[in-house]
Amino acid sequence: KNIYFFKDDNYWKYDTQKKVLGEVSKITSFWGKIPSSIDAVFTNPHDNKTYFFKGSRFYQYDYKNQKISDGYPKLIKDVWKNVC
C-alpha cells in the first residue's frame, strides 16, 4: 500500500514497502481535475473509494477510469450528513 501526501497543487507518494518517498508531482497529473490546496483526503475502507474535500464540496476518485467520478463535485452537506 502507498501513502499520499498533498500540499497546494502537489503530491508525493510514499511506498510503504520500500520505505521510499517519491518525487513531487502535480495533483492534476494523476488525480485529475481536483482543485489545489485541498482540505482533506481519505480512502473509505468500506467501499475502497478515495474522497477529496475542498471547501463545501467533495470529489470521488474513480480508480478504474483514473479520473474524478461522473457527477462530482458534490456538496458535502448533501451526502455526508452531520459533517458540516
Image (tube, rainbow, N blue to C red):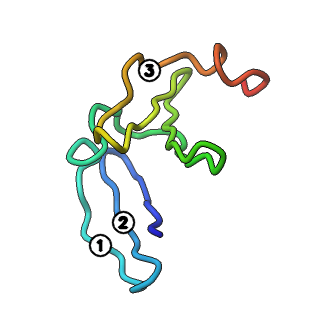
Residue 6 numbered tag: none
Residue 21 lies, with reference to residue 11, above or below; the image says below
Q: From the viewer's side, name the closer residue of 70 and 58.
A: 70
Q: What amino acid is found at the position of numbered circle 2 in the picture?
A: Lys
In three-dimensional space, the C-alpha distance between marks 1 and 3, rounded to whole angstroms, equals 28 Å
For the residues bearing labels 1 and 2, Cβ distance under 8 angstroms: yes
Q: Residue at x 47, y 69 (%)?
A: 1
In the foreground, 39 or 16? 16
Quick one: 49 or 13, which is closer to the camera? 49
Residue 48 in the image: state x and y as whole percent. 55, 47
Q: Position of residue 29 (x, y in %)?
A: 20, 47
Q: Which residue is mark 1?
A: 22
- Which quarter of the picture shows residue 4? bottom left
Relative to 51, residue 56 above or below: above
> How dense is the environment of label 1, judged by Cα within 10 Å: few (below 14), some, or many (20 and up)?
few
Of callouts 1 and 2, the N-terminal one: 2
Could you tell which of marks 1 and 3 lies nearer the N-terminus?
A: 1
Residue type for callout 1: Gly
Task: Give the residue at mark 2.
Answer: 13
- Asked if the residue under mark 3 is in contact with the one under mark 2, i.e. CB atoms within 8 Å, the reply is no
- Name the amino acid type tagged 3: Pro
Which residue does the numbered mark 3 point to in the structure image? Answer: 73
Q: CA distance from mark 2 to mark 3?
A: 24 Å
